[in-house]
Structure formats: structure tokens, C-alpha cells
Image (cartoon, coloured by chain):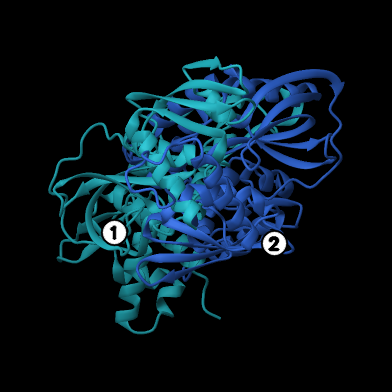
Chain colours: A cyan, B blue
Amino acid sequence: MAIAKAERLMNLALCLLGTRRPLSKRELKESIEAYLEAGNEESFNRMFERDKDDLRELGLVIETVENLDGDAGYLARRDSNRLPAIQLDAEEAAALGLAAKVWQQARLAGAASGALQKLRAAGMPEAEDPYAGGQHSALEPRIPVHEAAFEPLMLACRDRRPVVFEYRKATAARPETRQVEPWTLECWRGHWYLAGWDRDRGAERVFRLSRITGKVRSRAGAFTVEVPDVVTVRETVESWAGETATRSALIKLRAGAGYPLRSRASAVRDLGDGWDELAIPYGHGLDAWLVEFGPDVVVLEPADLRADVVDRLRAVAQG
Amino acid sequence: MATNAIDQTRRMLSLVTYLRERPGAHVDDVARAFGITQDELISDLDVLPMCGTSFRGGDLLDIDTDGERIWWHNPDDVASPLRLAADEATALLVAARAVSTLPGLREGDRQALLRATAKLEAAAGEAAGASSRLSVTFESEGGVFADVDRAISERRRLWLRYYSPARDELTEREVDPIRLFAVGHTYMEAWCRTSEARRTFRLDRVAEIKLLDEPSEPPQIELRDLSEGLVQPAAEDPEVVVEVGPGGRWVAEYYPHDSAEELPGGGLRVTLRTPDPTSLRRLALRLGRDGRIVSPAGLAVSAREAAREALAAYGPHDGRGPDPVA
């Protein structure tokens, strides 16, 4: 039976951490059974390179040093791999334990528990069940990640690698190819958004991950535009959602109906005939929202909103 | 959950450090400390004796267990605590920052989280840098949240005035809260005493809330598995078919559905199930010229009638296009 990958990785890690001088590939091969069984030199080389990458993903700092005879040697120095001293009390440990549970994405969930395990090994006290005894908030926050594009984009943001993907705008018939220098990912109201530099448009853009179709591919080369210190994803998305209203609209609303409209009204007046008059913020998308309330809403002003609502109603009335 | 080789390697490296300080550690204690099952721990302990710096020289970890306690007979100093990887620092820091901004979080918890975050940032060093490339904002209604949180810890019943968008109405009900969770929005899972059934309430739809003096006594029920998604239509729910043009593709993003077939011209034919199709009248109205309900026919008719009734309040000269009826 082939030797399990975890065993091979563990052996490589122990060899690299255990040595005081750089070890050549040959020496590592002699010391690790799985490499001897790897078959020919080429498959050993491939396996070795992949394993080194995997260990680096785990946080191991592996140095490549040239030996006297010109061969590459490898080692993971203790001092560059040691966790700096960190003292966490039981309350802090409990808080981190709660936070680590929020990820529903396999890679980040694994990384979060890996971090806790490293901290535990470094002496972090054990927390009791944070929900027992009622001293902590009874909240279970979860961060959903359903978008396939999330993981490749997270890695591209981390490594500052340009990407290319097919993107279908909300109202577009067909997806378009977008070349992007990805800056940050942000989750808002349960959806993930990417902010970055759109190379073809020569401007900053925000993308909704669920509208990315197909695979996210990495591009060679570096970013061409400097990453800004502050990236404002949320403000952009809020304006899409019509939450940055600059004007006000006046509507009639049937008494008892439309609670969400009432809850954001700046003024409400009882008209006495089973109807109320409301002033509400007028931002992008208000027309579509008002139409949802059917005959319980009548738009009074402004005229352009009234016209939009009437057009939408006519489209539905015609079936 | 199946363990992948990366996660297992990461765990075994920490395990070695942990075991070095605790000769004769108990299997159940170690499994709990690492957040894994005893079986997972035993499978790690099966691998570790095959690991070392030289299999030929016999320089392997001499770690063994009798199933109850764990012994490491040749501990060495290879096992110092390892620095955090960029992904590890990111996963923990982003989560901690997100949770610490929840408006309803108790102050003691928030302070502990902020302290831990600062220490973690310092200890992670450079690895903490990448964590600024990911951020999460939870939505939550601070006041309502605090009342629900208090009701749960004091085991008290709640009275709610709750908005149902499906029917555009506010209903009053008494509920026994079970838990709070946040997935984008913040929700309360509760046993509804009015309908004697489990219900999930979105906190931003709670119009009014009161703590009652009656004790909360929800029946023992299995908690919902949140990884499955919040809306889980039942197989027996009626089917609704919606056809949308390119401008209505968002329907597939917002409504959990069984299928979404591409239509010529960039549209979609979305098939979904809902216990109450009349609740989708809003959707039909909202779609306007961007889509239509194909079935059930009654739903399309009721949307059409609602639109006609609404138009009666306007004159023939309203709107941008010509009124086809006038």
C-alpha cells in the first residue's frame, strides 16, 4: 500500500525542522521511505516540490541554501518557525474558539482549527463550552460560502495574483471575460463580493461572486496598479441595493400594509380614509420594490418614480 | 468530516508539541483539546510512529498508546510551537473581527475577543497581513438581539410582532427561543407557541419584542443543520415555474431552486418549490417585463389582477409608455 501523504509530509517536516544544516534532495530521499518508493527521479522530484509547497501552505518557512558543491539544500530553521510567545487567558481562548467555528468553507474551517491547535500546543488554556452557564452570548454566527469562485479568489487576493474569469452582469444576456487584479473579498448580507482593478476598463470594479461563471484562472505577472489602502466594497454594494438614497419620495400606503416601508419612512400622516401618506428615501430600485405591494401603494411624487411604477404595473397587467 | 492530508499533517505537528509537555496524556482529553474525535486521534497516533528524521537510522517518534493514555518515550526538541500560516491567521482574525462587530454581542465577550485579536495579530506577525484582504459584516438588530439573547439565557418566553413578507402582514405570536445564529442576517430559531411548530425568525423583521415572565419550554428538538442552507423546501411543496429574461436572472440568485435552465436570449427557466405559492405574487409583480410566472396559472392571474387594481389609482397619461388599455 502506498504510504499516506500525511505521513510523507510529516516526515519531510520533521527532517527539515530537525536539521541544523541544509539537507540535499538526495539526503532527504535517503531519509524518507515514501520518496524511495516514489519510483523514478522525475516522479520523486515532482512529489518533493509539491510537498514543499504544501508545507509552506501550513506556514513552514523552508529555506533553500546552495551547498559548497553547488547543490541546493533545504532546512526549516527553528527560530524562523517558532510561534512568538502568546499568553491567552481562558476567556480569550473561549472567544477565539467561538470565532473559529464561523467558517463553513472547508479550507478556512481547516485553517481556523489548525490555528487553534497550534495555539493549544503553545499552551492556550482549554475553554469550557461557551454556551454552558449562560455567561456568553447565545449567538452562533456562521459565514456562508457557497460560491465556487471563493477559494481561488481568496488565494489570488492573498498572493496578489491577477485573474481572469467569465462574469455575467445582473442584466446581461451573456457572460463577458474580465481581467482583474483582485484586492479584497467582502461578505455582506450573506453574499461575497470582490473588489479589484478591472484591466480592460481601467477602473476599480466590484464583482458579485455568484455571477462569476466557470473557472477563475490565474494570470502570470504582477499587479500593474497599486492596491489602495482602503477598499470600499460595501459602499458600492449598498448603492446597488438602493441604500444610498439622495432624494425622497411621497407615497400613499393602505393602512396596516407595508410594514417595511413604514419602518423606513421619515414621515407618516394618517389620511383618514384607510390610507396613510409616507415620505420614504428614494434610491435605486425603489420602483421595483413599490410594485411588490400591488394595489396597497400609490406613488404621488416624484413624477419619474410614478412613471416607472406605472410602466412596471402595465407590463404585469398585460401578462 | 473526512480529514485531508494537509489538515492531518498540521494537526500532527501540533500534537507532537502538545504531547511533549504532557507525558501519559489521556486520549479523551487530547481529542477534546484538539477538537477531534477519539478515532481521528487514534489514526494520527498510528501514523506518528512511522515519522521521524530517518527511517533507516531508526530515528522515529516512539509514541504509543494503550487506547487510554499516550506515551512518548523519546521526546526531542523538534517539537517547539510552530508559527501561524497566512491562511490560519486569516481564518481566525477575519472571524474574530467579524464576530466582535456583532451589535448584540455581550460586552465581556467583545472585550475578550478584542484582546485575543490584538495578541494574535502580534504573534502572527507578517502572516497577519493577508487577513486584511478578507472581511465579513454581519447584519443584526442590536436591540432585538439583546432581548433574544437575554431570553435565551434566562429561559423566558418572548412575545413578537413579526413581519411576514409573503403576506405583507404583521402577526403577533409567543415563542420559546432556542438559539440565535447569523448567516448574513441574524436569525432566531424558536418554538412558536402560536403554531406549535419550529420557526425561524429574521431579526430585522421583528417589529416589536417583549420578554414575558413565563418560562421558555421548547420541546427537545434536533437543531437545524445550518450548512444545508436556510430555506429547505419539502418534496411535497407545490412547484412554481418562472421564466425570466436577462434582467430577471437575479431570481436564481435569491430563490433556492430545483433547476435553472438557460433560455435562448440569456433568460432562465427557474423551477422552485414553496409551501405557499401565493407568497410569490410579490415576485411576479416585481419582475414586470423581466419575467413571468408560467405555473401555477392561478398565481399569474392573481399578479395580473393585482397590477390592474393598482393601475386604477393612476390616470391614462401616467407612465412613460402609452397606456394600452386607454
- Is A83 drawn above or below residue A182 in the view shown? above
Dot 2 falls on a residue whose secondary structure is: loop
Q: Looking at the image, which residue is at 71% across and 50% down?
A: B27
Dot 1 falls on a residue whose secondary structure is: strand
- Is A218 drawn above or below residue B284 in the view shown? below
Residue B121: image tag: none
What's the residue type where badge 1 is placed?
Tyr
View extreme (bottom): residue: A40
User: Do the residues marked 1 and 2 share a common chain?
Assistant: no
The front one of A25 and A43 is A43
Q: Looking at the image, which residue is at 20% across and 47% down?
A: A197
Q: Nearer the viewer, mark 1 or mark 2?
A: 2
User: Which chain is indicated by disc 1?
Assistant: A
- Tell me how many marks there are: 2
- The part of the image, by quadrant, that contains residue A191 is top left
Residue B271 seen by the camera: yes
Residue A107 seen by the camera: no
The front one of B202 and A259 is A259
Q: Looking at the image, which residue is at 20% across and 35% down?
A: A228
Percent x, y for residue B237? 71, 60
What's the residue type where badge 2 is placed?
Pro
Residue A74: image tag: 1
Percent x, y for residue A181? 22, 50
Q: Residues within 10 Å of mark 2 (few under 14, many from 20)?
A: some
Residue indicated by mark 2: B238
- The part of the image, by quadrant, that contains residue A272 is top right
User: Which chain is indicated by disc 2?
Assistant: B
Looking at the rendering, in which quadrant would you find the N terminus of chain B? bottom right
Q: What whole-number distance in Å separates the C-alpha atoms at marks 1 and 2?
A: 63 Å
